[in-house]
Every structure is written in structure tokens, then in C-alpha cells.
Image (cartoon, rainbow, N blue to C red):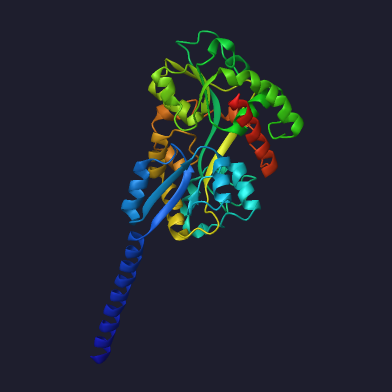
Amino acid sequence: MKKHIFLLIATLSGLVNSAVEIWAQDNQSQNQTLNIYCWTEYIPQSVIDAFTERTGIRVAVANYASNEEMLAKIGAGAGSYDLIQPSDYTLAMLKADGRVEKLDLSKIPNLANIAPEFRGLDFDPNNEYSVPWMAGLVGIVVNVKEVKRPVTGYTDLFKPDLKGRIICVDDPRELVTWALYTLGKDINDISPDALDAASGVLKTWMPLIRAFDSDSPKQAFLNGDVTAGVVWSGEAALLLREDPDTFKWILPSEGTHLFLDNLAIPKGAKNIEAAHRFMNFVLEPQVGKMISEEFPYTNPNLGARKLLDPADLANPASYPSAEEIKKLGMFKPIDGARAAAIDRLITDLRSR
């Protein structure tokens, strides 16, 4: 009898301890804030709200408009972030400098939902430092009701008849890259000679551009402020979803490149456990669907794709054909001196 009483007490004690442990974890979550530094127009508020409801962890979001802006800020020690959203080549630079934490992959089982072609890439061959977020590219959007002549590439776009009606993403390396494409040069050649050649092209383009906008260029199209431009594929997909008869998506004939944006944990992050929970959460198929519905880039999450509307899967800006993807290169890392040279060049040209 005493033995049975002892076992009952031990069992009850274990249940109480488990309950206390769960309560402590929940209470800790309630007091946590996950700080994310990410691209503008990229993480739906609905996803953030769902994560907080699920975990009790609050989320604070700060935004940047280019990889270089993000690198400059965290390099200067400004801000305290638990998650960042670097593109492929930027992650490679952060890894090389020891500025990102190695992931505990046992805490991210939903990584199995990522399509094979987006895992094991050169910038993170074992996916030890990054979780794919969205892939995409830059391309040309034209309002075909306003622009009657053919536009097949950058050279066709940047013509005097469209002066003051063109919008471009606000990203110095992108601008230089487009010029290099038109010259038939390697987009990862940022030598002084290459920049000098690109400068000659950009000098003729800059006076034609009405606005630079990496955040939401689609609004300028919808407002009628611009009729053509070079934008992120997700923004183009939203325009095609809104009015496919007015807006046309064009892969530049001279070339464009694929990017893969990722979630990563910066060195020194305070809430590493919460960061892992968020990464695993956004890889759930239903959550991935929520992301794609609001920001229709190329979703590397195969589980999420199965839930998408067929019309979204058929959107050419969201999902280029396999043949088109094969033609796309990727950016390679560049050192700080070359990045600074690009910034100086674009700053100088824009100030004229």
C-alpha cells in the first residue's frame, strides 16, 4: 500500500514539475521579442500575427531596401537583431566574416519542404547558416496600353521617349549589372575598367528615370505615374495579378539573374531559440501559402506551392519556366572596396 502511495505521489509530482516547466516556457515566450531586420514588403503582417498567437513571442520588424544597406548597418554595430534576410551572395560574405550563427537543424525539421534546387547551393552548401525564404529576379514591366513600341530589354527600355515615365529598383549593384549586361560583360566583374564602361551607359539612362523604389514600385504603375520600369519579380507578379491586360512582364533579352533571399541569425543574436522557431514556422506549407499570396515571388517551399491557386502558379513573373531559370546566373560576393566603388558611382550619377 505504501508503495502504491509513493508511486502516486511521484507521478503527481512529475506532472506538477512538467506543468511548471511548460508554464515557465510559455511565460518566457510571453516576455520575448524577436527582432527581425528584413527587406521591405516581404513578411506579411498576418504571418507575424500568427506566429505570436502560436508562440506568445512578440515580433519587431525593421526594414532595409538593399543588401548593402543591411550590411552597413549591422557592420557598424547598429541595431540588435535576431534574424536577418540576406540574399545569396550577401550570406556568403557574412559567413566568410564570421557574422552569422550556425543553425541547429534539428530545430528546423520543416526545412524538408524546400525544393532540392534551392538547397545545397554554393553560398551555403549544407544549409548550415540559412533557410531559404523566397527566390526571384529582376525584369521589365511595361504598361502596354501606354507603350506601343516593342520592349525586349534594357536597351529598348531606356529610350528618350520614355523619359520621366520609368521606375527602377533602388539598388546600386542592380543598376550596374544591367549596364554590364548590355555591354556583354560578366556581371560579377566589378573591376575599375568594368565600372568605367558601365558608367558610360548609366550616364545616358539616369536622366530618363523618374523614380527609384525597391519597396512598392507597383503603386506608381497603378497610379499612372510611370509606364515602364525594372522591378522585382514579386512586384511584377502583383501587377499581372491586378491587371494582366495592361501590364506585361519581360525577361530582358540581354540577361538577368536569379536571387535567393534567406533567413539567417546574425552573430550575437539574443533570441536564438525564438529565431529557430520562426524559421521552422514559416516553412509550414500553410504559412508559406500565406507569404506567397501577399508577396508572390518564387516560393521554394514545395508544400506551400501545392496549396496555391493555379493562376498564381501560372504567373510568369512568379514562376519562370525551367528553361528560363537555366539561363539565369547568380551574384557572387564582392569585397567592401568594390561595393563602395559601386555606391560612389551611383551616388555621383544620381546627384548630377
Identified at 48% across, 38% down, the residue is 299
Q: Nearer the viewer, residue 70 or 152?
A: 70
**Residue 189 at x, y = what percent?**
72, 34
Residue reaching furthest to the top: 148
Image location (x, y in percent) of residue 15: 29, 74
| Residue at the spot 57% in from the left edge and 50% down from the top edge | 76
* 281 vs 322: above or below: below
Q: How many marks?
A: 0
Q: Quadrant location of the C terminus? A: top right
> Relative to 155, does residue 80 appear above or below in the rendering?
below
**Residue 293 position by quadrant:** top left
Q: Nearer the viewer, residue 272 or 302?
A: 272
13 left or right of 86 in image:
left
Residue 335 makes an appearance in the image: no
- Horizontal arrangement in the rendering, residue 189 relative to residue 113 (left or right): right
User: Is residue 196 in sight in this rendering?
Assistant: yes
